[in-house]
Structure formats: C-alpha cells, structure tokens
Amino acid sequence: MKNSIIATALVAAWAVFGLRPAHADIGPKPTIRIDLPSEISGQAEEGVLLLCKQADCGDAQPLAAVGPQRFSCAAAVCSGMAYGFARYLQLKLKLKDGREMTSDVFEKKAFDAHFKAIYRQDGIAIVEQ
C-alpha cells in the first residue's frame, strides 16, 4: 500500500513537471559585423572578439561560443552574435603569414552593429558605420 502511494505520487509529479513544453531561446540577439580592409582581406586565419569592462581592455575575455553566441572571421568579414556584448570591444586577428593584429578598443552602440576595419602599420582601427 505504501509503495503504491509513493509510485502514484512519483507518476503525478512526473505528469505535472515532466510534460511541460520546452521553451527555446528565440528572442533577438545583438549582432556585430566587421568588414576587413583590402590589405588583409583573405588573409585572416582566425579572429577573436575580446569583451572588456575596462576602457583599456585590461580585463579582456574572448566571446565564448555558447548556444547561438559565437564570433568568426571569413575572407573579408568577421561577424558574430551574442546574448550581450560588453561596453568595450577589441578585435584580434591571426593572419595566414603568422602575424597577429589587434585593433584599438572600440564601442558597439547599435543592436545590429556594422563596422569597417581600417588597416594601419601598427594595427587596425575599427569605425562603426
């Protein structure tokens, strides 16, 4: 008798809590797109978007790939989506010839932000479009 009461309680709990529909994370996510300059277009082997709380990016952390959140670079563009971006950002590129380039610290203001990267001898400047 005691076992049947426990079994009934477990089945009832499963029916109440276990049969709820799953809720997908379907809300809009902020995005970023960075057009690379012609001087390095096609040379980017890897790109990392660094998220920073400090204006000098002394506390930089790479954007983690979690669910739909990610960042990647192709031939002439880097793009990403996140649950939220930090106030300050920095782009770090590894080129096919082994060079690494780091951008100035920049801020993302638009929900779906579009940037243009400008090549300089000492790095990359990022300008929001």
Image (cartoon, rainbow, N blue to C red):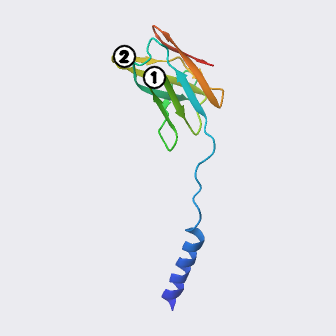
Indicate which disc, 2 or 1, sits on the residue closer to the N terminus. 1
Where is residue 58 drawn, in percent x and y? 51, 24
Residue at 63% over, 30% down: 112
Residue at 53% over, 32% down: 80
62 left or right, relative to 85: left
What's the mark number on residue 39?
Answer: none
Eyeballing the image, is 47 above or below 18?
above
Quadrant position of the C terminus in the picture: top right
94 left or right, relative to 28: left
Say which amino acid is labelled 1: Lys
Where is residue 33 drawn, in percent x and y? 55, 26
Where is residue 65 drawn, in percent x and y? 47, 39
Q: Which residue is mark 2?
A: 99
Mark 1, Cα crowd under 10 Å, few <14 / some 14-19 / many 20+, is some
Describe the element under mark 1 as helix, strand or loop. strand
Give whichever of 72, 17 is nearer the camera. 72
Q: Residue furthest bottom?
A: 1
Residue at 58% over, 26% down: 88
Q: In terms of image quadrants, where is residue 109?
A: top right
Residue at 50% over, 82% down: 7
**How far apart are the two marked residues, 2 and 1, measured between alpha carbons?**
11 Å
Q: Which residue is mark 1?
A: 92
Q: In terms of image quadrants, where is residue 111?
A: top right
Say which amino acid is labelled 2: Arg
Give whichever of 71, 4 is nearer the camera. 71
